[in-house]
Image (tube, rainbow, N blue to C red):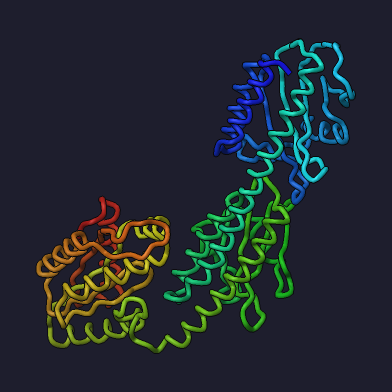
Amino acid sequence: MDNKQLLFLSKISEILAKELDTFELTQELKTSLSEYKALNSIRLYVYDSVTNTIRDCADSWSIVEDSSSIYQAFDNINGEDFILNGKAYKLPQKISEVSFKLNSLFMPIIKNEKLFGLIDIEFEENTSVNMEFLFLMKIFASQVSLKLQNIVLNEQSKINVEFHDSMKNIAKIIETQYELNYIVPLIGEMLDRFITDHLIYVFLKQEGDFKLVWPKACKDERIYEALEQIKPETEYLLLNNDKIGAFPLISEEGDISGCIVARSTLDALSKRDISYLEQLTRQSAITINRANSYSKILQYATIDALTNLNNRRQFELRLGQEIATTKRQNNPLCAMMIDIDFFKKVNDTYGHASGDAVLRGVAGIIKSALRESDIPSRYGGEEFAVLLPYTHIEEAKIVGERLRKAVESTPIEINSEETDIKSINVTISMGLAEFNKSETGEELFERADKALYNAKESGRNKVCVI
């Protein structure tokens, strides 16, 4: 082996010692090999035994189309050392002086004596090589094989960690939340982040029909056709060449309480995807069932467990009482709707435990900024509702601005495993309306909610009056 060959192998060893993703690895291998022989491209392919497909390592692990010549090369190279210009070839025991023109070269990647992948090299037309070069390429393929196996193993380990984190996070939601309209979107977001190759839809069964809860829209009629076929004994249902999968949520009584659907326009669900979705759906069903149970227990309670403010049921009861008092005594009354700005971003960036800390922190600021006679409540999710008895709208605007500034200027302590940040600042948007005797309490808060919408649409962190 001459100095040029030794230098080439030394460079390859240095590349393989680096922390690279498969795209970077492919680019650096191409650069080094190009210095030795003129070539057009180099590609790395791995066989996925779970999906029975070949994946392009440098192209985000995308699945190679069935019609590709790569599949034929996989079949033809089995047991051989190379495919040279389309023909399978096995190295002789001794190096001869034979030289020839080379356009394309496939080399096997072996794991546990089985074909694991392929290295595909396209040379410039009629590149001249000899037998020494082929022996060198066999060493090169052996080095790359070990690196690629480690990358694939690390990728799989990362997926397993993310799966267990998703399971744990779905289970933990119920520690502080029990409102389905709040926790189901959280579950949908967690599933969507984990099953990245498919769109996720979450349906709940209400009054005998499936209602889409997350995301806001689903226009694929095939999904609704799948829902009609779901039965309590159905483990899961696959449609459209396995590109749509429906996984029922089962209640404690054994009835269908909802369904999680995964949909893709490109790839079929793999056996691995199906296994993950089955387990995630079971954990989601447990969380939703517990939320339903807690909700039944707490439906007669008056205090929200997370914020220690009035819950929505108590708020609606107090609203009726204050409307009656206002009409009877002819006193002023104002309504305030509050929303934490970009609350979803807080959850996504710092985790849901930090989101709960923000809810508690904002609730505490609201309570401390109001009078004893004011009635603050958690309305749902990141929204708060406040009744301001004996208050005209101009006074309410002063209270609202004071509250908005207090939230904006007060750091809120968070407990996040995802960052070293100990506290964050958030802002709120607010809508105000004053009661007039021709409307109901519901209409009063509809106007306050519309004012809140205007505040959010016009830039957030402001108070709007309607």
| Residue toward you, 168 or 248 | 168
Q: Position of residue 431 (x, y in %)?
A: 24, 64
Q: Where is residue 38 in the image (x, y as percent from the top left)?
A: 67, 14
Task: Answer above or below: position of 119 versus 461.
Answer: above
In this rendering, position of residue 133 left or right of residue 389: right
Which quadrant of the rendered structure holds the N terminus?
Answer: top right
| Residue toward you, 76 or 281 | 76
Which quadrant of the rendered structure holds the C terminus?
Answer: bottom left
Task: Answer above or below: position of 173 versus 57.
Answer: below
Quadrant for residue 432, please give it. bottom left
The residue lying at 23 percent from left, 62 percent from top is 411
The residue lying at 49 percent from left, 58 percent from top is 216
Quadrant for residue 398, please give it. bottom left
Q: Position of residue 311 (x, y in %)?
A: 34, 80
Residue 438 visible (yes or no): no
In this rendering, position of residue 393 left or right of residue 191: left
In this rendering, position of residue 49 left or right of residue 331: right
The residue lying at 89 percent from left, 24 percent from top is 93
Residue 121 visible (yes or no): yes
